[in-house]
Structures are given as structure tokens and as C-alpha cells.
């Protein structure tokens, strides 16, 4: 594995770490809303956005490199990172809707 491949591998793990933290915070927001603590829920959602955006920026940098003609090495770790990004995006949308439902039934 080349040095560049190692760098990409580390970048993929950093993406996974950031979006994993975002997912944890989104779920904490849901649990807070379930208990009626909507202020905490909103804070957790806002904090999660920071981690998601950081992971997304790193992913976008890989896409930009490939778009300029650089050949990136295929990696299951990178595929996992992309999967986590998509999952967290979907989970966040659903949790926001669920929090809104909790608000309506309070």
C-alpha cells in the first residue's frame, strides 16, 4: 500500500469517526425529545450537524480529487465511510420528523 493509499485509508476512518459521532448525537436528540427535553434535542441536532459537515467535507475532497483525474484506490473502508454518510443523512431526516411528532403530542 502506498503512502497516498495510507492517507486515504486514514481519511476514510476520520470520515467514519465524524459521521459516527453525528449519528450518536442524532440518536441522543431523539431520546431527549422522547423525554420531552426539546431544548436538549435541538442542541444535540445542532452539534451533530458540525460532525456530519466535517465528514462530508472530507468526502467531497476525495470526490474533487477523482473529478480532476486522480485515480483513487478502491477500498472497502472508503465504501463503508460513504455508506455511513448516507445512513446518517437518512437517520437525521427521520429523527427530525420524529422529534416534530413528539412535539405535537406533548
Image: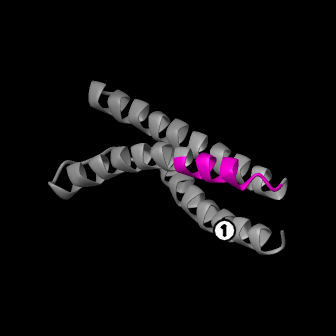
Say whether residue 26 is visible.
yes
Q: Residue at x 75, y 68 (%)?
A: 103
Residue 36 lies in what quarter of the image? bottom right
Q: Position of residue 72 (x, y in %)?
A: 29, 46
Tell me the residue that label 1 is attached to.
Answer: 94
- Residue 77, percent from left and from top: 50, 42
Which residue is rendered at x = 64% and y = 45% of the image?
A: 25
Colouring convention used in this rendered image of the protein? one colour
In the figure, is residue 10 to the left or right of 105? left
Considering depth in this image, is 4 or 85 the residue closer to the camera? 85
Instruction: In the displayed orientation, state which residue is furthest to the left.
Output: 68
Q: Is residue 23 visible?
A: no
Picture layout, residue 63 above or below residue 102? above
Is 38 contained in the magenta span? yes
Rendered view: 55 above or below 2 = below
The C terminus appears in which quarter of the rendering? bottom right
- Using a 10 Å C-alpha cutoff, classify the residue at mark 1 as few (fewer than 14 neighbours), some (14 to 19) or many (20 or more): some
Which residue is depicted at the point 42% across and 30% down? 10
Magenta extent: 36-46
Amino acid at each position: 500500500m502506498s503512502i497516498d493509499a495510507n492517507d486515504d485509508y486514514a481519511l476514510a476512518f476520520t470520515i467514519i469517526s465524524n459521521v459516527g459521532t453525528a449519528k450518536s448525537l442524532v440518536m441522543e436528540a431523539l431520546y431527549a425529545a422522547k423525554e420531552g427535553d426539546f431544548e436538549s434535542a435541538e442542541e444535540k441536532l445542532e452539534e451533530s450537524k458540525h460532525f456530519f459537515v466535517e465528514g462530508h467535507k472530507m468526502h467531497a475532497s476525495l470526490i474533487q480529487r477523482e473529478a480532476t483525474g486522480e485515480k483513487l484506490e478502491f477500498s472497502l473502508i472508503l465504501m463503508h465511510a460513504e455508506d455511513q454518510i448516507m445512513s446518517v443523512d437518512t437517520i437525521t431526516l427521520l429523527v427530525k420528523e420524529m422529534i416534530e411528532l413528539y412535539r405535537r403530542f406533548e
